[in-house]
């Protein structure tokens, strides 16, 4: 069996690791961190740190003239940056990912979309987390007042052309991996 024949299915060639134990090492309302003792298919044991976070939705607000982005301060990198509206369900609120995308769009920008179409399902950091991101394209935008959470009070929004967004990625004004991946999916969608 050739490696090419099983491209995208490494279990067919190598097998899967086996988890021996798992223990919770940290937890807060937004995330959990666990340590898993595993044995790789070659018989070597190792430790894996795993971050558990809920899946989130990212939405691309698009109109005839371009794309809307939001900018806010992000604590971990210690900077403000432009990104597409995004987030996960908080507290007891739950629903499907399309409903989450519509909620994030309304909360962060005030827009309500006539059409919301999923462009992709990705894993932004699958080396240490199973958290996934669902990317949606929002069109037919009706403006309204944002309903931002307290942590988003410094958020601003602005409209950009596709060329401006591409330039912002190149210059490092946009550094959010989800936003960059979403822009790539949007570009691929437009070319098909």
Image (cartoon, helix red, strand yellow):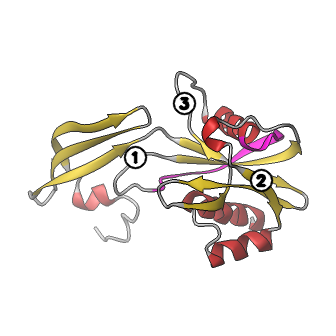
> Within the image, what quadrant is residue 27 found in?
top left
Number of labels in the image equals 3
Query: Counting other residues with Cα less than 10 Å from the Cα at mark 2, is it few (<14), some (14-19), or many (20 or more)?
Result: some
- Residue 155 drawn above or below residue 142: below
Q: How far apart are the alpha carbons under marks 1 and 3?
A: 18 Å
Is 38 placed left or right of 139 in the picture? Answer: left
Q: On the rendered structure, is 141 left or right of 166? A: right
Q: Quadrant of the N terminus?
A: bottom left
Label 2 SS: strand
* Residue positioned 17% across, 52% down in the render: 47
Indicate which disc residue 90 carries. Answer: 3
Q: Position of residue 145 (x, y in %)?
A: 84, 37
Q: Which residues are magenta?
A: 108-124
At 39% across and 65% down in the image, what residue appears? 7
Q: Residues within 10 Å of mark 3 (few under 14, many from 20)?
A: few
Residue identified by numbered label 1: 130
In the rendered structure, are the residues bearing label 1 and label 2 in contact, judged by CB atoms less than 8 Å apart? no
Name the magenta segment's main secondary structure: strand
**Residue shown at 16%/56% (left/top)?**
41
Check if residue 116 falls in the magenta segment.
yes
> Can you give x and y, in whole percent of width and height, for residue 139 in the image?
83, 47
Q: Mark 2 and mark 3: span between their CA atoms?
A: 22 Å
Mark 1 and mark 3 lie on one chain; the one further toward the N terminus is: 3
Alpha-carbon span between mark 1 and mark 2: 30 Å
Label of residue 121 in the image: none
Q: Which residue is mark 2?
A: 157
Residue 162 falls within the magenta-colored stretch = no
């Amino acid at each position: 069996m050739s490696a090419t024949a099983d491209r995208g299915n490494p279990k067919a060639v190598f097998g899967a690791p086996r988890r021996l134990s798992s223990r919770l090492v940290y937890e807060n309302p937004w995330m959990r961190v666990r340590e898993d003792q595993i044995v790789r298919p070659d018989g070597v044991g190792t430790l894996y740190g795993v971050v558990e976070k809920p899946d989130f939705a990212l939405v691309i607000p698009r109109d005839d003239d371009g794309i809307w982005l939001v900018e806010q301060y992000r604590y971990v990198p210690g900077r403000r940056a432009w990104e597409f509206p995004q987030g996960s369900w908080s507290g007891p609120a739950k629903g499907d990912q399309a409903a989450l995308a519509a909620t994030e769009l309304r909360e962060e920008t005030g827009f309500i979309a006539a059409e919301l179409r999923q462009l992709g399902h990705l894993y932004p950091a699958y080396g240490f987390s199973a958290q996934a991101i669902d990317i949606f394209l929002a069109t037919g935008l009706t403006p309204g007042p944002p309903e931002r959470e307290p942590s988003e009070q410094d958020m601003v929004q602005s409209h950009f052309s596709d060329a401006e967004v591409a330039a912002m990625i190149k210059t490092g004004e946009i550094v959010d991996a989800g936003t960059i991946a979403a822009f790539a999916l949007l570009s691929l969608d437009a070319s098909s």
